[in-house]
Amino acid sequence: MKFVSLGLLSAATLAGLVFWSSSQAEMTSIPYQDSPSITAGKAVYEAHCAACHGDKLQGQANWQIRSAEGYLPAPPHDETGHTWHHPDQMLFEFTKYGPQKFAGADYRSIMPAYENRLSDTEIWQVLAYIKAQWPESIQTKHTEAFAR
C-alpha cells in the first residue's frame, strides 16, 4: 500500500510540475501564434496603444528625436522599430511597469505603466498581436534570439 501511495504522490507531483512549467512558459513568452490571443490583443491595442503607436504599428514621426520637452515620440512596433530587439519578458515588464523600470525613475517618457490598466493576460495578448504583424523572418529572428 505504501508503494501505491508513493506512486500516486509521485505522479501527482510530476503532473503538478508539468502544469507549473507550462503555466510559467505561458507567462514568459508571447503567444503570437494563438489566434484568440491575437484577436483579443488587437482590440486591446486599438483601445490603448494605437493612439500613440499608430493603427498599423508605425509609431510617430521622428520617433528617435527628443522633443523640446525631452520626450521621445512613440516608436513603431512594426519591423522598422526596435521592439523585436528585446526579449518577451522585457517587453511585458516594460508595458506593465513603464520604461522607468529599465531606464530609471528620472527617465522622461509619455509611455504610461499599464499595471493598473491592463491585466497580465491583456498585456501578453497585445504583444501577441504586435508580434503576429511582423514578417515571418523578423518573428523567427526574435524567437531564436531569445530562446536561449
Image: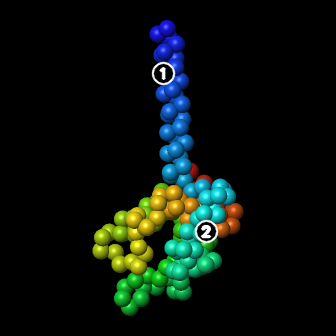
Counting residues from the start of the chain, the first of labels 2 and 1 encountered is 1
Kindly identify which numbered label has been placed on residue 116: none
Mark 2 vs 1: CB contact within 8 A: no
Where in the figure is residue 146, as x and y percent of width and height? 54, 54
Q: Position of residue 35 (x, y in %)?
A: 67, 58
Residue at position x 59%, y 65% from top?
41
Q: Mark 2 falls on what kind of element?
A: helix
Q: Residue at x 54, y 31 (%)?
A: 15
Q: Kindly indicate the quadrant of the structure image that contains residue 66.
A: bottom left
Question: Quick one: 29 or 1, which is closer to the camera?
Answer: 1
Disc 1, SS: helix
* Identity of the residue drawn at 61% across and 78% down: 55
Q: Amino acid at mark 1?
A: Leu
Above or below 99: residue 33:
above
Residue extending furthest toward the top:
1
For image coordinates 47% across by 58% down, the residue present is: 120
In the rendering, at what x and y percent does residue 42 appear?
61, 68
Image x and y of residue 141, in percent: 62, 60
Vertical relation: 106 (above or below) 7 = below
**In which quadrant of the rendered view does residue 110 lie?**
bottom left
Instruction: Tell me if I can see residue 25 in this picture.
Output: yes
Would you say residue 94 is visible in this rendering? no
Name the amino acid, label 2. Lys
Choose top left, top right, bottom left or bottom right for residue 116. Answer: bottom left
Residue 135 is left or right of residue 105, and the answer is right
Check disc 2 and report the residue beneath it. Answer: 42
- In this rendering, the answer to whether 62 lies above or below 96 is below
Task: Say which mark, if any, is on residue 9.
Answer: 1
Mark 2 vs mark 1, CA separation in Å: 43 Å
